[in-house]
Amino acid sequence: MKPRRVCLGSSLRWILQPAWLLVVISGAAAAVWLREWMPYVLGGACVAALGLWVLVSTLWPSAPDRKCPKCGVQGLVKIRRGAPGVRCERCGFQDETMHVAYLDDW
Ligand SMILES: [Zn+2]
């Protein structure tokens, strides 16, 4: 799959660099202005990020991509648990070296 490029109009493109500069300058100004609170702000941000990580991992657990390269149906299963190698339940496709992440847990 080719990566999609963000295409802004040429009239808007010049504003990106000043906008990023403004973001960096305002972030540095906020850090100087709130320097007594910065440890608490950073600690709170770390705790919030950890909580968000746990929430997202709980609500959307990892799932294997079982799509068969031959027939395109979700039919891949492991040949042996804990070892590389998959086969398709639908079309009989088999690859002894192919690895599909998280397929052992499925
Ligand atoms: Zn298949």
Image (tube, rainbow, N blue to C red):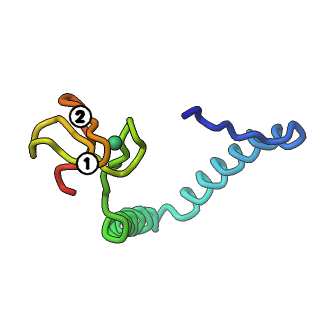
In front: 97, or 47? 97
Side of 106 relative to 23 (left or right): left
Q: Is mark 1 within 8 Å of ligand 1?
A: yes
Tell me the amino acid under the disc marked 1.
Glu
Q: Crowding near pointer 2: few (<14 within 10 Å), some, many (20+)?
A: some
Residue 100, numbered label: none
What is the spatial separation of the Cα atoms under label 2 and label 1, in whole angstroms? 9 Å
Residue 89, numbered label: 1
The image position of residue 24, as x and y in percent, is 63, 47
Where disc 1 sits, the SS reads loop
The image position of residue 100, as x and y in percent, is 27, 41
Identify the residue at image location x=66%, y=49%: 25
The image position of residue 63, as x and y in percent, is 31, 56
Image quadrant for the N terminus?
top right
Side of 17 relative to 38 (left or right): right
Residue 94, numbered label: 2
